[in-house]
Amino acid sequence: MSRFTKNTLLIGSILMGMAVILGAFGAHALADKLSAHQLQSYHTGVQYQFLHSLAILVFGALSFHLPETKLRWPIMLIGMGILLFSGSIYLLSTADLTGIPKGILGPITPIGGILFIAGWFSLAYKLIKTENQ
């Protein structure tokens, strides 16, 4: 297994584990501290983290068949999307508890969403450019 494959699978695994922890934290520790809307937003962050962490694991599996140059940008873009999209939603939905100002966080969420989209389109572009073998 190449270092790239190992690191991709490691990152995907850690992000999946963190999604489980954050989901459980939201369901148990935050359930009576946040409004229904805040909990739904928090759940959305967890859901997107789960889906995109799973995608990173799939990219790791794909790296057995595709060169890392085809996967490096999609993985980086989706990883940054998780950090900005899900991370900002976690902070926004718990801002009343933590005192973190919401003003600076609001614009970060759509940037994370754009990074998700860029990651998926980057993968599509790289696959279109891959010659049949």
Image (spheres, helix red, strand yellow):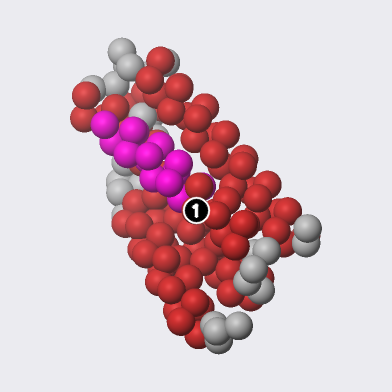
Does residue 50 show up magenta in the picture? yes
Q: State whether residue 9 is above or below residue 101.
A: below
The amino acid pointed to by label 1 is Ala
Q: Quadrant of residue 130?
A: bottom right
Q: Secondary structure at mark 1?
A: helix
> Magenta span has 127?
no
Measured as percent of width and height from the top left, residue 116 is found at: 40, 60
The image shows residue 34, relative to residue 71, as above or below, that is above
Judged left or right of residue 77, residue 133 is right
Q: Quadrant of the N terminus?
A: bottom right
> Residue at 38% across / 20% down in the picture?
27
Mark 1 Cα shell of 10 Å, populated few (<14), some (14-19), many (≥20): some
**Residue 87 percent coordinates (x, y):** 44, 43
Q: Pointer 1: what residue?
A: 55
Could you say which is closer to the camera, residue 96 or residue 119?
119
Viewed as shown, does residue 66 lie left or right of 25?
right
Tell me if I can see residue 83 in this picture. Answer: no
Q: Quadrant of the C terminus?
A: bottom right
Res. 16 image quadrant: top right
Give percent across and percent down for residue 54: 50, 47
Q: Main secondary structure of the magenta part?
A: helix
- At x 43%, y 28%, the residue is 23
Count of marks placed on residues: 1
Instruction: From this view, report whether residue 17 is shown above or below residue 131.
Output: above
Residue at x 78% of width, y 62% of height:
2
Q: Residue 118's quadrant in the figure? A: bottom left
| 34 sits to left or right of 100 | left
For image coordinates 29% across by 21% down, the residue present is 34
| Residue 43 appears in the figure | yes
Magenta span of residues:
40-53
The image position of residue 6, as x and y in percent, is 73, 53
